[in-house]
Image (cartoon, helix red, strand yellow):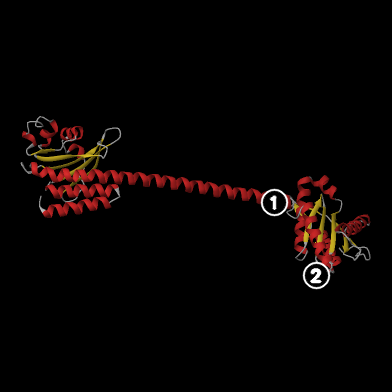
């Protein structure tokens, strides 16, 4: 063989080993087969697992794709090569003693063609490279077959490698997608778990109807505030609040309206009471409001403002005017208070005194704001 051919073939072999994209490799092989043989058309046909033929690449010497390639080549020659594993060169296919009776050759008026099998490293047929020149007889001779066979041998190795690479990439892609799906599922599960945890915390911390601290959470917060106040020797005040004659609201307007009245009361308290404060529903229509140091001195004033707000801001529901008032008992932290419960007991007693006096007022142990309305 000529040195130039060998050098070119070595470069082709090197390029084939570098190409990993399956489609790019097959197109390169066909283009090189056309160049090596001087053919007009080139094809790579692969054998599927079910033994049907896959016309993967079909191109002319200008690099253009050929449509309906399976109707343009001799299936008789192609199947013969893949069955026997032996290459074929036909100088004049229409007059060849072995193939001239093939219907495809006569119908297509085939002239010069060559076909070389693609054999795997295990000896199995992968497919074939098929080239043809339809305009000339004797375009291909026996000596033209060797370059095509050499190319086919190298091509089979490259195709196997590219197929393995493609399969590996497909597995990696599939596995990556599985991992991404698993991560997304895990993230969704974690988000749902956090949502459930937050919802459980909310339900365990806040009153479902009014949104303020429930009894347990209020006492937790109150004990913490009480301990800090005693330790730092700062003042603290507690207001106990109970809606007056609340049962009459339920009896006259129904429990839904009663619930809305409780929500309305909480809205008034939140709007009237300066921050910070600790506000909770202890049960039914009874609430507690803990005021820290800088608001504790104004406990009676804040209680009076709450009474005034409730008495002068009725609830309007379905064209009904629902009026209500509140009784407030106030107590300030004193030196003898060893526990929060002692402070709570004094505020609670003052609240009951306020209710017994007719409600709608604030009472403390040493002073009274009569009716602040």
* Residue sitting at x 17%, y 45%: 150
Image-quadrant location for residue 107: top left
* Residue sitting at x 64%, y 48%: 196
Depth check: give the residue in front, 331 or 170: 170
Depth check: give the residue in front, 197 or 7: 7
Whether pointer 1 and pointer 2 mark residues with C-beta atoms closer than 8 Å, the reply is no
| Crowd band around label 1 with a 10 angstrom C-alpha radius: few (<14), some (14–19), many (20+) | few
| Crowd band around label 2 with a 10 angstrom C-alpha radius: few (<14), some (14–19), many (20+) | few
| Residue that label 1 marks | 201
Q: Secondary structure at mark 2?
A: helix
The dot on residue 166 is none
* Residue sitting at x 77%, y 57%: 266
Residue 252 visible in the shown view: yes
Residue 318 visible in the shown view: no
Q: Secondary structure at mark 1?
A: helix
Residue 286: image location, x then y, percent:
83, 53
Image side of residue 52 versus residue 246, left or right: left
Image side of residue 23 versus residue 175, left or right: left
Quadrant assignment for the C terminus: bottom right
Residue 277: image location, x then y, percent:
77, 63
Task: Name the front one of labels 1 and 2.
Answer: 1
Residue 63: image location, x then y, percent:
19, 50
Image side of residue 189 versus residue 295, left or right: left
Image-quadrant location for residue 135: top left
Relative to 19, does residue 269 appear above or below in the rendering?
Answer: below
Query: Tag 2 or tag 1, which sits nearer the N-term?
Result: 1
In space, the residues marked 1 and 2 are separated at their CA atoms by 30 Å
Q: Residue furthest top?
A: 101
Q: How many marks?
A: 2
Residue 264: image location, x then y, percent:
76, 55
| Residue that label 2 marks | 294
């Amino acid at each position: 063989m000529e040195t130039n051919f060998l050098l070119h073939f070595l470069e082709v072999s090197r390029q084939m080993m570098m190409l990993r994209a399956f489609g790019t490799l097959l197109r390169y092989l066909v283009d090189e087969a056309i160049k090596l043989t001087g053919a007009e058309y080139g094809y790579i046909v692969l054998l599927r697992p079910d033994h049907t033929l896959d016309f993967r690449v079909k191109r002319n010497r200008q690099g253009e794709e050929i449509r309906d390639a399976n109707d343009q080549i001799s299936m008789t020659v192609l199947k013969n090569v893949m069955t026997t594993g032996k290459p074929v060169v036909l100088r004049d296919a229409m007059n060849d003693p072995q193939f001239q009776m093939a219907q495809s050759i006569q119908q297509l008026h085939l002239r010069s063609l060559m076909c070389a099998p693609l054999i795997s490293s295990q000896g199995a047929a992968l497919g074939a490279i098929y080239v043809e020149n339809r305009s000339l007889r004797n375009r291909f001779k026996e000596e033209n077959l060797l370059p095509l066979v050499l190319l086919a041998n190298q091509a089979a190795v490259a195709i196997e490698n590219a197929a393995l690479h493609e399969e590996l990439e497909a597995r990696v892609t599939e596995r990556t997608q599985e991992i991404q799906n698993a991560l997304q599922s895990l993230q969704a599960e974690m988000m749902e778990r956090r949502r459930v945890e937050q919802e459980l915390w909310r339900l365990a911390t806040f009153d479902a109807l009014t949104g303020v601290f429930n009894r347990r959470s209020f006492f937790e917060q109150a004990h913490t505030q009480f301990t800090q106040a005693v330790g730092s020797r700062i003042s603290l005040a507690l207001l106990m609040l109970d809606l007056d004659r609340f049962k009459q609201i339920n009896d006259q307007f129904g429990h839904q309206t009663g619930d809305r009245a409780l929500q309305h009361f909480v809205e008034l308290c939140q709007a009237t009471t300066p921050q910070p404060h600790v506000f909770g529903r202890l049960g039914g229509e009874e609430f507690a409001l803990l005021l820290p140091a800088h608001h504790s001195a104004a406990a009676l004033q804040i209680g009076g403002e709450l009474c005034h707000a409730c008495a002068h801001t009725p609830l309007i529901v379905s064209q009904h005017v629902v009026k209500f008032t509140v009784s407030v008992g106030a107590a300030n932290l004193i030196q003898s208070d060893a526990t929060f419960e002692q402070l709570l007991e004094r505020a609670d007693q003052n609240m009951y005194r306020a209710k017994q006096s007719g409600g709608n007022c604030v009472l403390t142990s040493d002073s009274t704001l009569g009716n602040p309305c």
